[in-house]
Image (tube, rainbow, N blue to C red):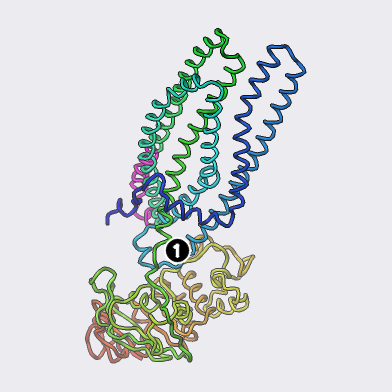
Amino acid sequence: MNSAQYHEEVALGKAYDGRLMKRLLRYVRPFVWMVVVATALLLVSSSLRVSMAFLTQIGIDDYIQTGDAAGLGRIALAFLAVIFVILLASYGQQFLMQLLGQRVLHTIRMELYAKLQRLHLRFFDRNPVGRLVTRVTNDVNALNETFSSGVVAIIGDVVTLILIVAALLYYNWQLALITFLVLPALLVVSLVFKIKVRRAYRDVRTRLARTNAFTQEHISGMTVTQLFNQEQRTGQKFDEINSSLRQAHHRQIYYYAVFFPVVEVIGAVSLGLLLYYGGVRIYEGTLTFGGLVAFIQLVEQFYRPIRDLSEKYNILQNSMAASERIFDLLDTEPAIVDPPAPKRIEQFKGRIEFDHVHFAYNDEDWVLKDVTFTVEPGERVAIVGSTGAGKSSLVSLLFRFYDYQKGAIRLDGVRISDMRVRELRSHLGLVLQDVFLFSGDFAGNVRLRDDTIGDDQIRQALSRVGFDRFLKGLPDDLHTEVRERGSTLSTGQKQLLSFARALAYDPNILILDEATSSVDTETELLIQKALEELLKGRTSIVIAHRLSTIENADKIVVLHHGRVREIGTHTELLNKRGVYHTLYQMQYSRMPYEATRTARTP
């Protein structure tokens, strides 16, 4: 998959999809009373707008032309009263629909976020973060207009059109036919606009998602960009993507800028014909002046809902495209799910068994092949191997971030696939090389929103890993602010915090994945001291490139090209002079082997 495909959006479907609309309306059911009241208010305001033409005719024909000032005053008051009621009805309708839109959006956002938290890691491997952020933000916001000014407003526009057409025919069917003469031209313009704006909108959505994905990716990797002096090249690439988005917006604006003036011109032509024909009818005495003014007023109202319906088409196009992508995400089934009849470990001991495990990320491109070894309760086992040997994949399988294709992994004799994922992970603690910190404070980054872990436990955990010395002198102590991704902390400080997390949660089994590979000697000594206490009496798996950190392990498993090649203690493996011996020699090649063995073999 190339970069363009990776950031590409799915193709747009129909402008209106009954299946999608039915699913969207499911979110409206708890608030159906708002829709009913808003629709009633909209019908009231639409009817009153039509009635204003009748008041205009009465005012002109019965009072202005007859010089009845008192009657004209009463009509003026009635006119103001109608405007006031329309104002109140419109305010109530808009308030209710905006409120409805925000409540529906809140519900959909919560569903999307909950779904993202349940999805498997393979899904995130295949979908850029920028695209997923677009789902939760832009796509959800696109639905707001559907509920706030879409469906109910379309009903109002259609009802208004029906009322106006009936009123036009009631006043004068000959004038009404003249008005309708321009409708074929209006229909053709609307169809062309519909086709053009749909294409333009599709381009905008595609380029917006691409812009979001590129921006997220390169801001996250800003350190690498600056390290290799790629600011100019990255800026040029962003300029290309941003210019493409701007051009797509320009095309969309152009079609709207052409469509509405064309509709106005068609309306002006219709008005010119009415003035001419109406003037002749007034001269002949078959039409009153007030009737012509009222008719023209109705014609002007006739074009307003037509223009609104064209805008509503864009809203529907927007919402259908957005809802299709949203429901596609909501319908994504997690690959890692709980079994129908989960098993529990009644008396947890901590025995881990890998039994002829095969695993591949893609098809049968095996990363792990026939991996078999056992970790006994309380045992400290190290996993070593060159880069790409499959060490981190073992950890991912144990946590069920991915599922293996063949073999079995058992925890105290129970297949991990037969356990609830939440229960399985509650027994495991993981400390990674690449530590992710959230914005907040130190206490929050250790507690991770688990309110059962108090400040005293956090303080004790930080003290045991030696992080308390970094807190000294800070004005807010545990509640000192941690910026996004821990940008103000060193790599060693971040890893000490991750150890404190593990201590605070006190897992039955602890897995360390390259946890000390990026720290300085002083920090490593702090960590090693804390590890001795942390790992005591606890089943643990330590993955490390630096062999000096695992010399005291009870057992060392050597992986090579996805297979277990050697198992034994540090001394046993050195004496075998196999893969482990080669790795050891490569790390300490500056020292003679015997001297190294004497210095480092316990």
Q: Quadrant of residue 477?
A: bottom right
Which residue is found at the position 42% from the left and 26% from the top? 183
Report whether residue 270 is seen.
yes
Left or right relative to 87: residue 559:
left
Q: Main secondary structure of the magenta part?
A: helix
Q: Is residue 70 above or below residue 101?
A: above
Estimate the x, y position of residue 505 in percent, counting from the top left: 53, 79
Q: Amino acid at mark 1?
A: Leu
Left or right relative to 430: residue 575:
left
Q: Which residue is mark 1?
A: 116
Is 238 magenta? The answer is yes
Which residue is found at the position 46% from the left and 55% from the top? 23
Left or right relative to 70: residue 2:
left
The residue carrying pointer 1 sits among few (fewer than 14), some (14 to 19) or many (20 or more) residues within 10 Å by Cα, namely some
Front residue of this view, candidates 3 and 5: 5
Q: Which residues are magenta?
A: 224-248
Estimate the x, y position of residue 115 in percent, counting from the top left: 46, 64
Which residue is found at the position 61% from the left and 24% from the top? 53
